[in-house]
Amino acid sequence: MAQLYFKYGAMGSSKTANALMVHFNYEERGQSALLVKPRLDSRDGGHMVRSRIGLTHPCVYFDEMRNMSEDDLRKYDCIIVDEAQFLSREEVHYLVHLVDDCNIPVMCYGLRADFKGELFPGSYELLVMADKIEEVKTICWCGKKATFNARFDRTGKVLKEGEQVVLGANDKYIGLCRRHWMAGDLGPDFNMRGMGD
């Protein structure tokens, strides 16, 4: 039986690299996996998924997948969705339909919460609807598990207000443990890492 998976983690936990490795593993075994991302994620250019360590692969946008027939989608052994936090409730329910009614496994990768510590709508729905939930772990500068996503400005100040979605990577976000996220502490070496410039 197919299942819906939600693999979440803080910024820098290699969620996208994991998604690309799973995609590679399917192809290596002679199976086919469809790599998908929301159109909102435009950081890596059109129709491309890119990890911080340089892995890349072409993808389709979620709305393009929705326009595919169920017969065409059944040709895939798995559907892999990156940046799943940007999905709507209705889009997550469409993935549930693909799993339950079309018997297609779906693996979603994304953030659980935003820089304010609030759940993204897509993540909320995936936490409710997923058959399997797994945390992809990374660490804070202090060595503890990072569970929060800190957004910071050019001066290194941690921001707690603003739009929920501001696209960025290491230039705007860093994973922190709860203590350092609450304190707004990016660590003693923040400017030395070249991210605070």
Image: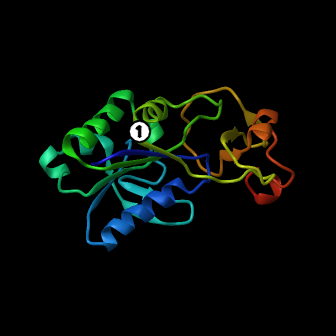
* Residue 50 seen by the camera: no
Left/right placement of residue 115 relative to residue 5 reads: right
* Tally of numbered discs: 1
Horizontal and vertical percent position of residue 31: 26, 66
Q: Is residue 140 left or right of residue 95?
A: right
Look at 49% across and 49% down and name the residue there.
43
From this viewpoint, is residue 74 visible?
A: yes
21 up-or-down from 195: above or below: below
Q: Position of residue 91 (x, y in %)?
A: 33, 33
Viewer-closest of 192 and 67: 67
The coloring applied to the image is: rainbow
What's under tag 1, amino acid-wise? Answer: Ala
148 in relation to 52, above or below: above
User: Which residue is at a point 61% across and 46% down the rendered structure image?
Assistant: 10
Near mark 1 (Cα within 10 A), the count class, few <14, some 14-19 or many ≥20, is: many
Name which quarter of the figure residue 14 lies in.
bottom right
Residue 56: x, y in percent?
44, 64
Q: Nearer the viewer, residue 192 or 146?
A: 146
Instruction: Say which residue label 1 marks.
Output: 130
Q: Name the side, left or right, on which 118 lies relative to 70.
A: right
Q: Residue furthest front?
A: 1
Q: Position of residue 124 (x, y in %)?
A: 48, 30
Q: Residue at x 76, y 50 (%)?
A: 144
Residue under the point 41% across and 38% down: 130
